[in-house]
């Protein structure tokens, strides 16, 4: 069953993606054409658009779901195909379909296609995992060399049946356990009898032996994968760079080092912050400024030095919520803080005091989502207290962040809180995705509405 499945399923993937895109476009057409918001499309038009989708999806191979792929990776690949589809549709819509299409209609199409195709891909992903958990569509694998991280990989195969990896055992000269099938020399005699798909190699094998196994695998159509040692079993995915014929591992590369990811995040920041500035800050700043001035003397804005990307110091903007004092940089606001004014208490409780930071986003000092920036003195203190603290400055700080929606916002009362905040910031930086940003923004709104305990 596994061989037949491997042979025909790529075609099922392609057929399913084409059918799902056609149904999505058909539903979109039926829902929105009666409103007059979208041009009328016939079946030939929908077939052309679905063919365009399939062509892009096939070129990128993102309709093929890998055995060890997680849901977020599947959706990330989908999002790139969706952007390519919208760009191609914007260019080809009029010459191919003979109809006009404005930006609003294109955005509407993108949102609907992203939602419907996202559901389809996740459902397919889930069904594949269920299917493989039952012992179907498996691949036979062995490990050459037992030691280091090899046993951990074998444990993963046993625990994650949804990967569809049927672990047959080790070949190792020194190990003699129930899973050892023989010495390394026996591998070359036994492998042709095992119907192998994958050979995993312990990273400490001799280079000449590794080359011999790879040559053998090439002749027998077996995939070879090297198990990195413990020093490379990090909390993130590794990538590679090529220098001529030599490959090196990028050990500490992050998703936002990718130019496309960085552009997408920055473009969203500018568009979102621009809309907030035009439609909210344009009237909020004069209104709140007037109320602040009526209650107490001093500036409307509280400008504070904070550490941003690469530890660069910038002026972080907030509405002034306290009477002017000499301890604003070193003494955190606490519950019932006497320095907080009446209008300041309202601004803090509703988080409106943070709204001017959208201007920091437009200036390029901050992002909508990212690690929250600390004051310069606090930053120096925390940096001396814990390892890897400075890693949170690899990217722009944010108005909100993963740590904040996980409950670590406001006053830092213990070392556990700052360590948890840094740990979550580290996870966010190394696992960034546009969907994660959107999820954090939605949860931020929930926190603002229903969790106000630490808003003081």
Image (cartoon, rainbow, N blue to C red):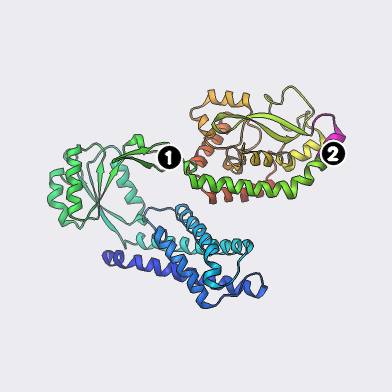
Would you say residue 36 is visible in this rendering? Answer: yes
**First to last magenta residue range:** 289-299
Q: Quadrant where the C terminus lies?
A: top right
Residue extending furthest bottom? 43
Instruction: Give the residue pinned by disc 2.
Output: 290
| Residue 298 location, quadrant | top right
- Is 25 on the left-hand or right-hand side of 36? left
Note whether 162 is above or below 369 in the view shown. Answer: below
Which one is in front, 116 or 285? 285
Note whether 189 is above or below 103 in the view shown. Answer: above
**Label 2 SS:** helix
- Is 443 on the left-hand or right-hand side of 77? right
Q: Please provide percent x and percent y for residue 209.
A: 17, 41
Residue for point 36% across, 52% down: 160
Instruction: Give the residue pinned by disc 1.
Output: 235
Q: Please provide percent x and percent y for residue 79.
A: 50, 56
C-alpha distance separating marks 1 and 2: 49 Å
- Is 247 on the left-hand or right-hand side of 172? right
Residue 434 included in the magenta stretch of the image = no
Residue 296 included in the magenta stretch of the image = yes
Mark seen at residue 402: none
Q: Please provide percent x and percent y for residue 206.
A: 19, 37
**Label 1 SS:** loop
Residue extending furthest front? 95
């Amino acid at each position: 069953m596994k061989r037949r499945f491997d042979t025909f399923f790529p075609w099922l993937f392609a057929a399913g993606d084409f059918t799902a895109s056609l149904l999505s476009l058909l539903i979109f057409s039926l829902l929105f054409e009666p409103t007059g918001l979208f041009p009328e499309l016939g079946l030939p038009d929908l077939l052309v658009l679905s063919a365009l989708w399939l062509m892009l999806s096939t070129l990128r191979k993102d309709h093929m779901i890998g055995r060890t792929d997680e849901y977020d990776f599947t959706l990330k690949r989908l999002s790139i195909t969706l952007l390519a589809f919208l760009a191609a549709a914007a260019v080809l819509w009029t010459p191919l379909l003979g109809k006009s299409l404005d930006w609003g209609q294109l955005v509407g199409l993108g949102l609907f296609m992203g939602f419907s195709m996202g559901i389809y891909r996740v459902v397919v992903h889930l069904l594949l995992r269920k299917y493989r958990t039952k012992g179907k569509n498996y691949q036979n694998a062995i490990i050459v060399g037992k030691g280091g991280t090899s046993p951990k990989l074998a444990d993963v195969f046993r625990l994650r049946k949804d990967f569809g990896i049927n672990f047959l055992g080790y070949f190792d000269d020194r190990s003699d356990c129930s899973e050892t099938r023989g010495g390394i020399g026996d591998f070359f005699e036994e492998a042709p009898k095992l119907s192998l798909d994958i050979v995993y190699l312990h990273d400490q094998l001799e280079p000449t032996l590794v080359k011999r196994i790879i040559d053998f695998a090439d002749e027998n159509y077996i995939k070879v994968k090297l198990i990195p040692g413990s020093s490379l079993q990090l909390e993130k995915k590794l990538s590679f760079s090529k220098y001529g014929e030599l490959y090196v591992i990028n050990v500490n590369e992050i998703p936002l080092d990718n130019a496309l990811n960085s552009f997408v995040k920055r473009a969203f920041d500018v568009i979102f912050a621009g809309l907030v500035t035009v439609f909210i800050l344009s009237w909020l700043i004069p209104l709140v400024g007037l109320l602040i001035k009526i209650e107490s003397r001093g500036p409307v804005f509280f400008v504070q030095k904070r550490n941003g990307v690469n530890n660069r110091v910038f002026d972080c903007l907030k509405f002034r919520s306290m009477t002017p004092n000499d301890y604003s940089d070193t003494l955190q606001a606490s519950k019932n803080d006497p320095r907080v004014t009446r209008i300041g208490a309202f601004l803090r409780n509703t988080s409106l005091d943070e709204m001017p930071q959208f201007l920091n986003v437009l200036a390029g000092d901050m992002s909508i989502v990212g690690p929250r920036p600390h004051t310069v003195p606090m930053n120096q203190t925390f940096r001396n207290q814990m390892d890897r603290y400075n890693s949170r400055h690899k990217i722009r700080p944010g108005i909100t962040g993963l740590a904040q929606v996980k409950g670590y916002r406001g006053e830092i009362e213990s070392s556990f809180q700052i360590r948890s905040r840094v740990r979550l910031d580290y996870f966010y930086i190394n696992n960034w995705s546009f969907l994660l940003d959107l999820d954090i923004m939605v949860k931020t709104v929930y926190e603002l509405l229903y969790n106000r305990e630490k808003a003081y």
